Image: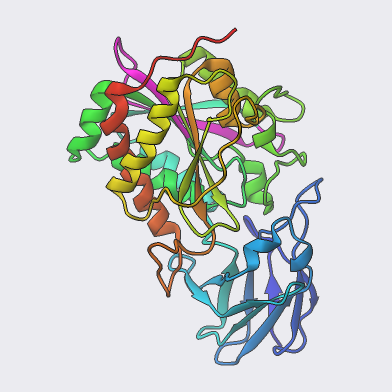
Amino acid sequence: MPRIDAAFDSGNIEVVTATDPNDIQLRIAKDTGSDFYQWFHFRLAGAAGRGVTMRILNAGGSSYPKGWENYRACASYDRDTWFRVPTSYDGTELTIRHVPESDYVWYAYFAPYSMERHEDLIAAAQQSERCAVEVLGETHDKQTIDMLTIGAAAEGRKPLWVFGRQHPGEPMAEWYMEGFIERLLDPADGTSRALLDKAVIYAVPNMNPDGTRRGNLRTNALGVNLNREWAAPSPEKSPEVLAVLQAMDRLGVDLSFDVHGDEAIPYNFIAGSYGVPGISDAHVAMLDRFQQTYAAMNPDFQTAHGYPKPAPGKGNLTTSTGHIANRLGALSMTLEMPFKDADNQPDPVHGWDGERSKILGRSLVDVLLAVVDDLPPRMKRN
């Protein structure tokens, strides 16, 4: 008889019935203290060589049902290499069909990035003489908010912030951060050396470790969407945002780059702080140039598809991008990556995945070096 388990780091599924391999019925659990849900991650045992049909019964009521359109679930036998499997959506249920080659197979909404791998990333980074590690604060679940300082702050070096995983069910963000950090710490990489001569990088790979470990889509352990807390973070509800924002106040910000994933749009794109009240012409011009440069550096990035630009003065000031531009005057933007595939550069086997996210993160080093000398001064705010 097949068995479904999700009692592990970032696991999320509820079993309705698993007695018949041709009709395994499942439900995605809601985020802690919230109605958000979309992330799933579970293990199937005991079905090697047999076709299985798994139905997620509550997919139609999820936070982003358009995310299921033209979507294929991820599967892995070794939790390292992930591939896509046949998946269909009828507007109510998501159905995954697969013939496992091994007794154990893991399925997930996207290739997971575990808290154990996060610990490995921090441990490896601190071995570099270019990197200092720091705990900015503590979460509700007593996990740490880890920051890497790459390079040395010095006169003339610009403070650049890159952070990800405010939404824990967007693991492509931490895959991206891993690729970015690994390249910055590569002593043989001349582009990284040149960038660190001009800038100091403050990197927060995972801003929501509690939500990550709990298998949430968008919220922390208290049911709070961190990317709506920037205007008024509190130690009671959003200690993660408060810790990072206090560090930004202390260290300064010339550029803020927040890494995310988008459920519905099958492209890599940037949403900038265009709608912030009083945004300068220089900041608008650099937002445009930054995106054009990224597209030239890596064809997985594109500028034709994305979110509509907000009207002047109508930007969301509760998000990182809106708030950091509005209060701190910094050039500020959000990167979105797909859960599906990058339709401008499709991969029929893997779709968009962790390795491609890492490569896109590596390309950020090229983009930053290309623009760092011309970053506009911080906007003067009231």
Instruction: Residue at 49% x, 47% y: name it.
Output: 174
Residue 363 x/y as whole percent: 32, 45
Q: How is the image coloured?
A: rainbow
Instruction: Residue at 68% x, 65% y: name it.
Output: 6
Residue 254 x/y as whole percent: 42, 20
Q: Against 261, is 254 above or below?
A: above
Instruction: Residue at 79% x, 62% y: name it.
Output: 61
Closer-to-camera residue (257/12): 257
Residue 292 x/y as whole percent: 34, 41
- Residue that extends furthest to the front in the rendered view of this protein: 311
Q: Is residue 64 left or right of residue 332?
A: right
Residue 147 is covered by the magenta coloring = yes
Q: Is residue 315 left or right of residue 114?
A: right
Closer-to-camera residue (366/141): 366
Tell me which segment is drawn in magenta.
139-162
Q: Is residue 250 left or right of residue 367?
A: right
Q: Quadrant of residue 53?
A: bottom right
- Residue that extends furthest to the bottom in the rendered view of this protein: 50
Q: Is residue 204 left or right of residue 296?
A: right
Closer-to-camera residue (317/166): 317
- Residue that extends furthest to the top in the rendered view of this protein: 382
One can see residue 142 in this view: no
One can see residue 96 in this view: yes
Q: Against 303, is 310 above or below?
A: above
Closer-to-camera residue (176/141): 176
Q: How many numbered discs, if any?
A: 0
In which quadrant of the rendered image does the N terminus lie?
bottom right
Residue 213 is covered by the magenta coloring = no
In which quadrant of the rendered image does the C terminus lie?
top right
Residue 262 x/y as whole percent: 57, 52
